[in-house]
Image (tube, rainbow, N blue to C red):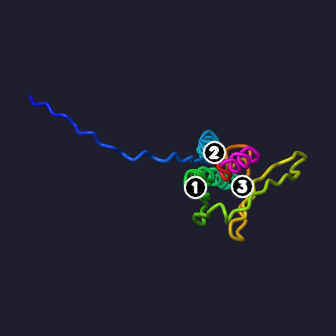
Amino acid sequence: MSTWEAGTVTLPTPTPTTSLSWAPRTAETGLAALGGLAMSALGFTVDPTGRWLVWAAAALLFGIAAIDLLVRPRLRADESGLRVRALSGRTVAAWSHVQMNLRQHQRFGRSVATLELDVDEKLIILGRRELGSDPEEVLRRLNQLRNGG
């Protein structure tokens, strides 16, 4: 058995990068898939006309679950800028090209917040469902990251 000594190797210290990401909650995605399974099984127990309606609802729930998985994470940000994923593609922008706003509006009698990202004249609107978190908290964290804190 031989022994050997390793020389001293100096590795460059990595610069700390803060990366944040948001995506639909995994539990909600799982519930959409389970709901699709339940609806597709239920389709066999109803009359022929109702069967197609129930299977359409199942397809919708499967579609929601699939989109949640395909565009995960929905929003990712670091010191250099942000990336937003959608079915139509990916949007990547430096912070200098991004304007962020929080929009509060009434929906079904309650106040709903959405995060609006204006990226080079392209408006991206993300709500609690897409982000998996409160849009107001996401905006606060994005502003901290953007300002170097």
| Mark with earlier residue (2, 1) | 2
- The question of residue 142 being in magenta is answered with yes
In the rendered image, residue 35, in percent from the top left (x then y), is placed at 63, 43
Up/down of 91 relative to 131, above or below: below
Taking the spot 29% from the left edge, 42% from the top edge, the residue there is: 9
- The question of residue 49 being in magenta is answered with no
Point out the stretch of residues depicted in magenta.
Answer: 135-145
SS at mark 1 in the image: loop
User: Which residue carries the number 1 mark?
Assistant: 71
User: Which residue carries the number 3 mark?
Assistant: 126
Mark 1: which amino acid? Val
Q: Nearer the viewer, mark 3 or mark 2?
A: 3
What main secondary structure does the magenta stretch of the protein show? helix
Tell me if 6 is positioned left or right of 73 in this view. left
Of residues 27 and 97, which is closer to you in this image? 97
Q: Which mark is residue 32?
A: 2
Of residues 131 and 59, which is closer to you in this image? 131
